[in-house]
Image: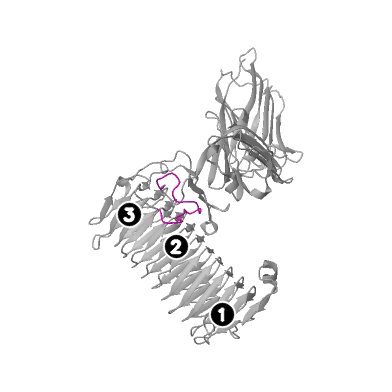
Amino acid sequence: MTVRSTDPNDPATVSATVIDCQGSNPDPHRAFLFINDEGNNSILNGISITNGYASGVYPANSGGAIFCDNNAAPTLMNCNIYNNTAVNGGGALFCQRGSLKISNCIISGNISEDNGGGIWFNNNSTAEVSNCIISDNVAAASGGGIACFFNNVTISECIFTGNSSGSDGGGFYSLYSDPTIQFCTFANNVSESEGGGIACQFDSPVIQHCSILGNIANQAGGIYLYSTSNSTINNCIFAGNLAERNGGIYVNNSNSSLISNCSIVDNTSTHNQYGSGGFYCYRSMAALTNSILWGNIGALGDQIALEIAADPSELTVSYCDVQGGQGAVYVDTGCTLTWQTGNIDLDPNFVATGYWDDNSTPGDEADDFWVDGDYRVQLGSPCIDAGDPNYVPSQNDIDLAGKDRIINGIVDMGAYESLFRDILLTKMTCKAGKTRGADADSISFQGSFTDADAYDFTSAVTVTVQVGSYSKEIPVTDFDKKGKNLKYNYKGGKEGITSVKLDFTKNTFSVSAKNLDLSGLVAPVSVVIEFGDHIGLGSAQDDSEQDVINGKKSLPMQLLSGNTNGLRVDKVVCKADKENKIGNLLVKGAIAAADDIDLATTSLLLHWGATQYPVGVGEFELKGKTKYQYKKSPDDDDPANIVISIDLVKCTFQVTAKKTLWPWEDSPLTFGMAFDSFYETEQVMFSN
């Protein structure tokens, strides 16, 4: 039997081909029941199933959309299964004593009043789930996305996001199942108990090449291993996970857990007495090797903690970069920490760290979300070629990004093998659009490869150009080869990357882009050019002035607007009068405020050396669409004529003052402005 849409590979066709079960509590219905030894030639392909409802007595109460039992082995491909409910378990799908293959499906918004908000594999089933999105499912018990009990399950290349569970395993839960989980992402899942991303109990799980990011739990924000044996976690990243106790990895009552080539970074345990931010070992034996533990926060030990004297833990650490070193590890009485060779305590030098965004509601943590960073290590990182020198990669061994695990003879620490090469930027021009309401920024840069002989352009599939947070992937086939020399040119459209020129004879490059939104770009501006197995990294910077591009021209202040506060003084003219007061003052420059501010409803304080000049609420007037102006005319008490103009969209300001009573001060002195949440100063120079 095959049930399929007219075009299973077209998402629009799949979304339009709907089986609406129209089920409800008083009138339950599901779409499919496989209970008669159906084989894998029973296929559902390219259809959508919704509004299934399973209730009553088993089996009627399990599998809101699909139920499998009695050696059934159906195949699901390219399906959307959403908004279904099961009173017992498996909001979308329940499988028991069957064999199921699911690929390229979306399992979303389903509800289970027991286990498996999306899927529940139960009791001697075999399952393969690949290339699926498991999102926003809810389980009252365990396994918000998927629950597995007494099964043989392989999960690969799937995304688990936004799932939640009332018990263990916000994204995925297994019990006596020995799951293999590979090339998956677990992000923003929530467990009210243990394991925001993953929870495994009485298993021997293999978890590799996975990203576990921004998950939340009462205990073990990232992953919870309980009574497991011979657990293997390698080439994974745990970042931004949050729990009351034990933010990253929590190993409890387990034997022989091996964590290798992992990056355990920026996880948080919020309890003020218990738990570790990174790795917590409780009544267990484990080993950490070739890994990075950095930026984690926890009451007992920020990076690592071993606990319970009654049943002591044992942990071996080798060839790891651990912030704070051995002295920062918490070791409870009776526990054993074996600190072997190769460990370091040096900044890994990540490309960019992630952070929690309060979603503009700092008082409400419920809507906070994790913004992921780039945890590849940059050139010069102490983690490069610092792993176990005796490590021998298996055939086709790769890192988290899918690149060769060893590049330069010795494995790197962490989830990523560094592929960065130097590029030298010789010129960069960046222009901001006249308005922040449209994508109107432009940038161009050029430079040279410092080791272009190492590049093999012909083996590349794509070329990726990244500047700041903007990234563009271009197929190599879109490049034209110019002449007999190794020159390759790309010409784009009117938006984004408009031109890329690569010359491997002269080892030079140039890139142009326009009609972008470069908000948030700050100097030094980082640039990445990636093709094949090589990544070129460089930046346009000046060591003494961080907002200057290539030591010549300042980064447009408009790009900071809405992201961070900034003040830059471009011109100062200051003259004293006969009474040694300031008779004539002009200050011009650029300004950027991180927050939306209405100057017509706030006060301002101007700083000129020791002089502070206040402007009261309501004294600024809006002139035109974007410019605020304060004007003070001479009067009998004060002969000063003062005008302050600020444009928070164009990011400019100007201060003029004549015949003031301000005392003269020699340069250099401090100029500054304070209004609302903005307060910035700069040292200025001038001559009388």
| Sequence-first disc among 1 and 2 | 1
- The residue that mark 1 highlights is 66
- The residue that mark 3 highlights is 305
- The residue that mark 2 highlights is 217
In reply to whether residue 397 is colored magenta, the answer given is yes
- Residue flagged by tag 3: what amino acid is it? Ala
Q: Which residues are drawn in magenta?
A: 393-411
In reply to whether residue 218 is colored magenta, the answer given is no
Q: Quadrant of residue 687?
A: top right
Question: For the N terminus, which image quadrant?
Answer: bottom right
Let me know if residue 475 appears in the view: no
Q: Quadrant of residue 502?
A: top right
Specify whether 646 is left or right of 376: right
Please give the name of the residue rendered at 56% of the width and 79% of the height, measured from the top-left corner: 66
Please give the name of the residue rendered at 64% of the width and 43% of the height, measured from the top-left corner: 518
Question: For the C terminus, which image quadrant?
Answer: top right
- Residue flagged by tag 1: what amino acid is it? Ile
Dot 3 surroundings within 10 Å: few (below 14), some, or many (20 or more)? many
The residue mark sitting in front, 1 or 3, is 1
Foreground residue, 114 or 294? 294
Which mark, by number, is residue 308? none
Tag 1 near tag 3, CB within 8 Å: no
Give the answer, above or below, for where 93 lies relative to 396: below
Percent position of residue 64, x then y: 56, 79
Which SS class for mark 1?
strand
